[in-house]
Image: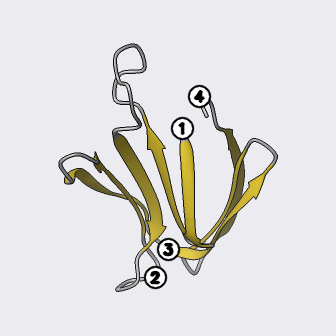
Amino acid sequence: SRYELKEAEDLKVYYYHDWQTSENLDCYGRVYRSKENPTELWLETGRLDPPQIDSHVRLASHVADLRFRPFSGGIEMVLLLDDGRETTALVTAAVLHNE
């Protein structure tokens, strides 16, 4: 897999649909903060050839901040949720495989 970090709030990861039979990275997953409604976090998945969106799912509402940061071998996500009553911070990381 490989990734493209367009902005700190927009991460696209490319991957193999079937790791045993795919010869090229043929799918993608994009996690991003909505430009139209910046309090929403979305996941878009799709195919690369031909270009096709397979799904578009809202992952979270009440997003106050979102940052993706590369680190050695992976990506870190810092997500801050705030609904006006409670604030929750989430920090998570993923290691890329099959580069």
Instruction: Give the SS element for disc 2.
Output: loop
Crowdedness near tag 4: few (<14), some (14–19) or many (≥20) residues, C-alpha within 10 Å: few
Q: Quadrant of the C terminus?
A: top right
Q: What element carries label 4?
A: loop
Mark 3–mark 1 CB contact (< 8 Å): no
Report which residue position mark 2 lands on.
Answer: 38
Residue 42 at x, y percent in the picture: 39, 62
Q: Distance between the residues labelled 2 and 4?
A: 32 Å
In this figure, which residue is indicated by the disc labeled 3? Answer: 62
Label 1 secondary element? loop
Residue carrying label 1: 1
Q: Is residue 80 left or right of residue 52?
A: right
Amino acid at the residue labelled 3: His
Residue 27 in which image quadrant: top left
Q: Indicate which disc, 2 or 1, sits on the residue closer to the N terminus.
A: 1
In the image, residue 58 sits, relative to residue 71, either above or below, namely: below
- Calculate the distance from the C-alpha at mark 4 to the C-alpha at mark 3: 34 Å
Q: In which quarter of the image is the N terminus?
A: top right
Q: Distance between the residues labelled 3 and 2?
A: 9 Å
